[in-house]
Image (tube, rainbow, N blue to C red):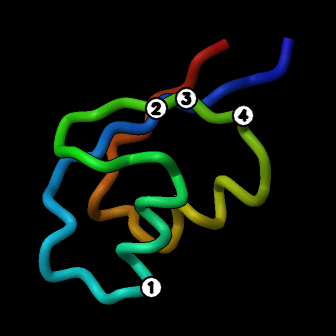
Amino acid sequence: MAKTLKLMLTRSIIGLSPKQEATVKALGLRRVNQCVTHADTATIRGMIAKVPHMLRVTHEA
């Protein structure tokens, strides 16, 4: 079974740069405290690295 990451948006995207806002939306996050699950890939890790101050990341087996 592939490892997954659970992402939660912890802050509002208001005031972010357009690139950062697009990254958060591309991760599938629209509202504060919304959670999504993604496969643990290099692409997703790179997106998380662009907006680490906005997300809470937990690992799932």
On the picture, is 34 further left or further right than 57? left
Quarter-of-image position of residue 12: bottom left
Task: Inspect the image, locate mark 2, and give the three-letter code of the amino acid beneath it.
Answer: Val
Q: Earlier in the sequence, mark 3 or mark 1?
A: 1
Marks 3 and 1 sit apart, C-alpha to C-alpha, by 21 Å
**Can you say whether 43 is above or below 33 in the image?**
below
Q: Position of residue 26 (x, y in %)?
A: 53, 59
The mark found on residue 19 in the picture is 1
On the picture, is 47 further left or further right than 50? right
Query: Quick one: quadrant of the C terminus?
Result: top right
Marks 1 and 2 sit apart, C-alpha to C-alpha, by 20 Å
Check if mark 2's residue and mark 3's residue have beta carbons within 8 Å.
yes
**Can you say whether 32 is above or below 21 in the image?**
above
Q: Earlier in the sequence, mark 4 or mark 1?
A: 1
Query: Which residue corresponds to mark 3?
Result: 37
Marks 4 and 1 sit apart, C-alpha to C-alpha, by 22 Å
Q: Secondary structure at mark 2?
A: strand
Q: Secondary structure at mark 4?
A: strand
Residue drawn at x 20%, y 35% is: 33
Task: Inspect the image, locate mark 3, and give the three-letter code of the amino acid beneath it.
Answer: Thr
Residue drawn at x 28%, y 64% is: 53
The mark found on residue 36 in the picture is 2
Query: Quick one: quadrant of the N terminus?
Result: top right
Residue drawn at x 20%, y 47% is: 10
Q: Earlier in the sequence, mark 1 or mark 2?
A: 1
Question: Few, some or many C-alpha atoms within 10 Å of disc 4 (few <14, some 14-19, many ≥20)?
Answer: some
Residue with the most extreme right position: 1
On the picture, is 31 further left or further right than 46? left
Closer-to-camera residue (16/54): 16
Task: Inspect the image, locate mark 1, and give the three-letter code of the amino acid beneath it.
Answer: Lys
Marks 4 and 3 sit apart, C-alpha to C-alpha, by 7 Å
Query: Which residue corresponds to mark 4?
Result: 39
